[in-house]
Image (tube, helix red, strand yellow):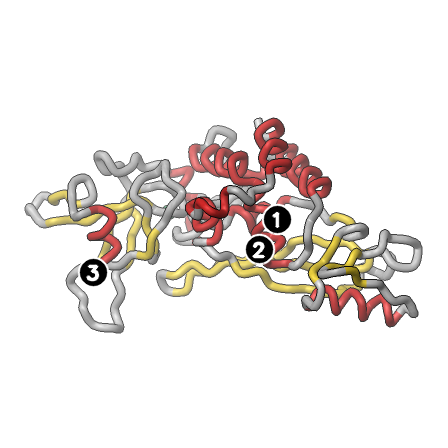
Amino acid sequence: MDRFKLDPFSYVSYEITPNNFDKYTKRTYPFVQKDAKHKNRFYGVCPGCNNPIMMVSLYQTQNATTHPYGRHVKHSIPQIADYRQDDYDNCPYANKNNKSNNKFLPAKSAIGLSNKRLLKEQYDQVIYILRKQTDVLFSNNLAQKMLDEYVNNTGWLYRNTTSDNLPWKFGEVISAKSLGGQYVKIDSDIQQAIRQYYLSKGKDIECKEKRMQVPLGNFDVCLKFVFEDFKSKLNGEHLQESITFVVFDSMLDNEIVYQKELPVEPDFLINLMRNSSNQTYRNKVLMNYAQSHVK
Ligand SMILES: [Zn+2]
């Protein structure tokens, strides 16, 4: 893997570089520990599973072709993290061959509960990210329904959910929903695709100010959306993940009207959380709803 965290209870991950390691650990214990031969070993926590990792080639390689990376340690490291096999099996950075076929984590999984806490505290930001990437301005009402569905299905126990990909894995839990009545951003690809689709049926949609309201579904056209095909690929040490946002007409054999691959941006949520000026703009309605409905 190419990212590390400082402790299992943190949601913040950093790229593995000598500079970041020095900056955030000051090369102190417990991040530096001696092995049996008194050689320094460099430790951190895996952002995917909260298990301990060891940095490989952190300082030795100075050329451009080899990069330092993190490797799972299959046992507990004092003061860094306790090793948990269940969470390792869930890790998107782990060897795929070891993965369990079971789609769900055990109910008391530490990483599952940690993701649940994160969602409860940051649900409005999760929706903000999905709005940004889809150009659909999901209403509070719809966002509340989606959260109910996520809670009813204990979505935080879906395997391979991490604090980095939570907003996108959230989409994976939600069944198809009507797009009728929702607003989309003007001049966005989705707005143009939907307007074109309606024009092809002989109807135009009026646009007001900077947004366009998708007409309520009827027997001619009924647009719905779904997040599907979550992809996770390890490119060398780098984890590349995405989910596809699909708009379709449920009245016409689910014909696809628009689709877009939404790339997982591992820093997106954490940057929102750290940006204090952003905190004043947080959606209080969704914050309160999540506080009382995620139990
Ligand atoms: Zn891991």
- Residue 217 lies left or right of residue 170; in this view the side is right
Which residue is identified by label 3? 57
What is the crowding at mark 2: few (fewer than 14 residues within 10 Å), some, or many (at least 20)? some
Q: Residue at x 50, y 58 (%)?
A: 241
Answer yes or no: is residue 104 visible.
Answer: no
Q: Are marks 2 and 1 in contact (CB under 8 Å)?
A: yes
What is the x, y in percent for residue 269?
48, 49
Which residue is identified by label 1? 172
In the displayed structure, 256 sits above or below 167; it is: below
Rounded to the nearest angstrom, the CA distance separating label 3 from label 2 is 32 Å
Q: Are marks 3 and 2 in contact (CB under 8 Å)?
A: no
Local secondary structure at mark 2: strand
- Residue 129 lies left or right of residue 37; in this view the side is right
Which residue is identified by label 2? 230
What is the x, y in percent for residue 286?
62, 37
Rounded to the nearest angstrom, the CA distance separating label 2 from label 1 is 7 Å
